[in-house]
Amino acid sequence: MTSFLDSVVAYLQRNQIKLDTGNQDGRINSIRNEDEVLKHLIKEFPSIKTPNIRCWWDFGLDSKEYELFVNIKISDFNNHAADNISAKLGMGYALTGIKNLPTSWSKFHKILAEELKIGYDYYFLVINKNDTRDSFWTSLKRIDTLVPNGNNLPFQCDWAKNRSFSARSEVEAMKYILSVYVKSWDKKTESYPHNLKEMLLTNRIFDTE
């Protein structure tokens, strides 16, 4: 199954793709560039399937024999910064094998706790925005180091530092992913305004009340 991703990376390493840097909003450039990469890949690999807009995966292979869902990440490998992974549903699929998880946090967490399964993963095609020939693939369970971030759940990743696969077993990888995910929530709740909530619960916002 991953031989397909090897072929995709080999194609990118042979064929440089010109990326758009013309918009001041880097997010717009990123969307355009992902579309441009995908256009080249679809032409070269007709078996590729694409989802509906705003899905948690950008392209993949989906047949009776196997499923493989891939997110395109175009990153500046020179800035030494972690990028958002920003796909809780992709993480959920990798940990449960369920493709259509609910977006509600409470429902998502309930299913995650009850339906953990081995045998699934969420793949990334990682491309250097400065030179698209510098590319590689990895997967959520193969990433060695994830970065917890309460402002950008579920977590972040410095792609340039994660070219090599982790040596964890699949179960160890699942435990690691969940531990970093929980740390992201810990960071999120660290800034929760507990004192303001207490003031409102007691209906006192001034000491003199």
Image: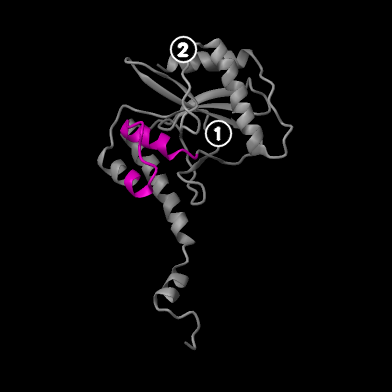
In the rendered structure, the answer to whether residue 81 lies left or right of residue 119 reads right
In the foreground, 171 or 118: 118
Q: Give how far apart the Cα atoms at labels 2 and 1 are.
A: 27 Å
Q: How many marks?
A: 2
Element on which disc 2 rests: loop
Q: Amino acid under label 2? A: Ser
Q: Residue furthest front?
A: 52
Pick the quarter of the image with the N terminus: top left
**Can you identify the residue that label 1 sits on?**
159
Tell me the residue at 48%/51% (across/down). Answer: 150
Pick the residue in front: 143 or 68.
Answer: 68
Mark 1, secondary structure of its residue:
helix
**Horizontal and vertical percent for residue 123?**
45, 27
**Front disc: 2 or 1:** 2
Residue 25: image location, x then y, percent: 68, 40
Mark found first going from the N terminus, 2 or 1: 2
Indicate whether residue 94 is drawn in magenta. yes
- The residue segment tinted magenta is 86-108
* Residue drawn at 32 percent across, 32 percent down: 98
Q: Any mark on residue 170, and which?
A: none
Residue 115 is drawn in which quadrant?
top left
The reply to whether residue 173 is in sight is: no
Residue picked out by circle 2? 47
